[in-house]
Amino acid sequence: MAGARRLPRAARRAQLIEAAASAFLRRGYDKTSMEDVAQVAGVSRLIVYRNFESKPVLYRSVLDSVLLDLAEAFGDVDLEEVRARGAAHLVVPVARRHPDAFRLLWRHAWHEPDFADQAMFFRHQVTYYAHEMLAPYVADDVLLAWAGATAGAHLVDGICHWLDVGDPCRDEEFAAMMTRGLRALAGAWARGLS
């Protein structure tokens, strides 16, 4: 740790967020200390505290790293383009840039009372986009609400599982396969209603 190289502040924060995501994912929020994060990052605990005043601030920053990157990825893309391309093609690159933080946000953060708001915001956004993408095909409001939540969860669960086992070199192939699968589901649901 004494030989940790000096990084610009933004690069150091990004390094610590990545290390924290890994530590929190592996050990859980309660069992992870700032010392654990420092060890994963290969720096002193003092460096962690210079960048993040507390463990809750650091955990929230880990979750925010994914949410902000997703907001940027979807920011200039209208719904028709998302529908044409498939949401997986936008979400997979973000998940790959933040694999541990992405899984932490979807699988674990909603169990943490202090951070459930971020996890629920993410789930709400996922459901909203799926709902809007399915709206032209599913006219029944009750079924559309169910389909939006179900398709959104399927997409993000599938991405999390891909991060667990998939080869990054095949991310584009996976995104195309996920898109075809979601379109098949939407088609089957639309046909089932008629």
Image (cartoon, helix red, strand yellow):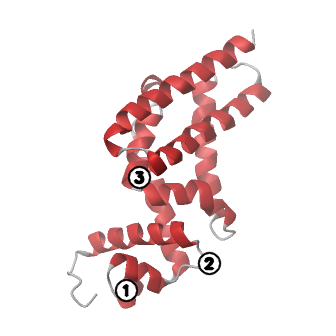
Tell me if mark 2 has few (under 14), some (14-19) or many (20+) residues whose alpha carbon lies within 10 angstroms of its own. Answer: few
**Residue visible at 28% across and 75% down?**
9
Residue 167 position by quadrant: top left
Distance of label 2 from label 1 (alpha carbons):
21 Å
Q: Is residue 10 left or right of residue 122?
A: left
Distance of label 2 from label 3 (alpha carbons):
26 Å
Q: Amino acid at mark 1?
A: Arg
Q: Which residue is mark 1?
A: 50
**Residue visible at 37% across and 86% down?**
50
Q: Which mark is residue 69?
A: 3
- Marked residue nearer the N-terminal end (1 or 3): 1
Under tag 2, what secondary structure? Answer: loop
Distance of label 1 from label 3 (alpha carbons):
24 Å
The nearer-to-camera label among 2 and 1 is: 2
Q: Position of residue 2 (x, y in %)?
A: 25, 91
Q: Position of residue 41 (x, y in %)?
A: 35, 76
- Marked residue nearer the N-terminal end (2 or 1): 2
Under tag 3, what secondary structure? Answer: helix
Q: Position of residue 77 (x, y in %)?
A: 41, 34
- Marked residue nearer the N-terminal end (2 or 3): 2
